[in-house]
Amino acid sequence: MLDYQRLLDRLYERLPERREPPKLDIPSLNIVHVGLQTHIKNFKEVCDVLLREPRICARYLLKELAARGSIDDSGVFIIYSRVSTQTINSLFKRFLDTYVKCQTCGSYQTELRRKGKVWIIRCLACGAETPVKPI
């Protein structure tokens, strides 16, 4: 019978080397104020990098701002009120921390799925699945 230490050493030899997850370069939001509206010009591109549907990101931001808005055909997100750049950036950071970032390994390479009534973040780097509150 093998002793505990030899089994433990054998286990550590077989484990793959721990790698840092590749950094995801998230572009900053290009926010422009047009009259009483706020336009985010590169919204679709940012959502594509995050592997999120633009309508889900937009729904979160509009709900937090208690405002109305839409996404036009070219991917520009229009908020029908004037919102400060700092407010949008802080809400977007909160969205990233809640609905994009893996709680286990900290990677931003995740996908958001819906299983029944539950939303789940599945990490593409470590495979962890974390339930999150509905958007």
Image (cartoon, rainbow, N blue to C red):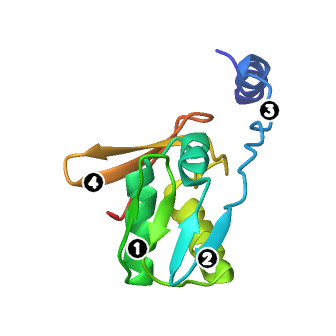
Q: Is residue 11 left or right of residue 53?
A: right
Instruction: State the SS at label 1.
Output: helix
Q: Earlier in the sequence, mark 1 or mark 2?
A: 2
Mark 1, residue position:
62
Nearer mark to the viewer, of 2 and 4: 2
Residue 113 visible in the current orientation: yes
**Residue 25 position (above or below residue 9):** below
Q: CA distance from mark 1 to mark 4?
A: 21 Å
Mark 2, residue position:
33
Kind of residue at disc 4: Val
Q: Position of residue 31 (x, y in %)?
A: 65, 68
Q: Which mark is residue 21?
A: none
Mark 3, residue position:
19
Nearer mark to the viewer, of 2 and 3: 2
Q: Is residue 8 left or right of residue 128?
A: right
Asked if the residue at tag 4 contacts the one at tag 2, i.e. Cβ–Cβ closer than 8 Å, the answer is no
Which residue lies most toward the left here? 116
Kind of residue at disc 2: His
Asked if the residue at tag 3 contacts the one at tag 4, i.e. Cβ–Cβ closer than 8 Å, the answer is no
Q: CA distance from mark 3 to mark 1?
A: 37 Å
Q: Position of residue 19 (x, y in %)?
A: 79, 32
Nearer mark to the viewer, of 1 and 2: 2
Q: Is residue 87 left or right of residue 134?
A: right
Q: CA distance from mark 1 to mark 2?
A: 16 Å
Kind of residue at disc 3: Arg
